[in-house]
């Protein structure tokens, strides 16, 4: 299987999975009757409700999002590190004298740089102690 075919297969599989309306994590499909799940947890359902209430107060459109400057700066920093790692690995790949161990080290660097980006959640993933006290509608 070529790299392009593998990439396409992963994209197709990801698009078929349902995603949480709040955190965008994949939701395990379930067979049977009833409405499809929209949230991966009760916490995400609660935060989505709170966000909708706040967006109505602030008169935000459906596609607008408010994040703190600190969260945005942190995400930009993580993306910068990932871009640097990607550039380093790209340069290493084109090197004529690339050993297997050097290739492994480059890939470790790329994975280490990508991990924080994949674990980032804008708005945070709240712990139960920080959940709002409002009742769901």
Image (tube, rainbow, N blue to C red):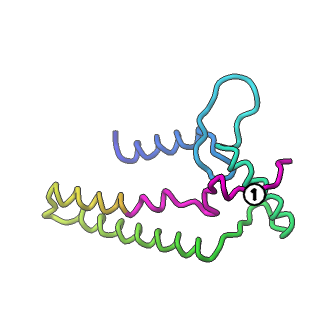
**Left-right relation of 103 to 135:** left
* Residue positioned 80% across, 58% down in the render: 52
Which one is in front, 71 or 126? 126
Residue 127 percent location from the top left of the image: 62, 55
Residue 64 percent location from the top left of the image: 74, 66
* Residue positioned 16% across, 56% down in the render: 101
Above-or-below relation of 36 to 91: above
Above-or-below relation of 8 to 95: above
Residue 85 percent location from the top left of the image: 35, 67
Main secondary structure of the magenta stretch: loop
| The image quarter in which residue 84 lies | bottom left
Tell me the SS state at disc 1: loop
Which residue is label 1 attached to?
132
Which one is in front, 43 or 20? 43
Q: Is 70 in the magenta?
A: no
**Magenta segment, which residues?**
113-137
User: Callout 1: few (<14), some (14-19), or many (20+) C-alpha neighbours within 10 Å?
Assistant: few
Q: Is 136 in the magenta?
A: yes
Above-or-below relation of 102 to 19: below
């Amino acid at each position: 299987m070529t790299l392009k075919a593998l990439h396409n297969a992963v994209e197709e599989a990801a698009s078929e999975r349902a995603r949480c309306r709040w955190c965008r994590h994949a939701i395990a499909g379930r067979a049977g009757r009833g409405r499809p799940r929209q949230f991966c947890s009760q916490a995400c359902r609660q935060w989505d409700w709170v966000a909708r209430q706040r967006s109505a107060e602030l008169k935000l459109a459906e596609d607008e999002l408010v994040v703190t400057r600190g969260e945005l700066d942190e995400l930009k920093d993580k993306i910068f590190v990932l871009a640097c790692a990607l550039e380093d690995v790209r340069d290493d790949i084109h090197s004529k004298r690339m050993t297997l161990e050097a290739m492994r080290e480059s890939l470790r660097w790329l994975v280490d740089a990508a991990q924080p980006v994949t674990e980032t959640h804008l708005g945070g993933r709240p712990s139960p102690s920080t959940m709002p006290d409002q009742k769901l509608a």
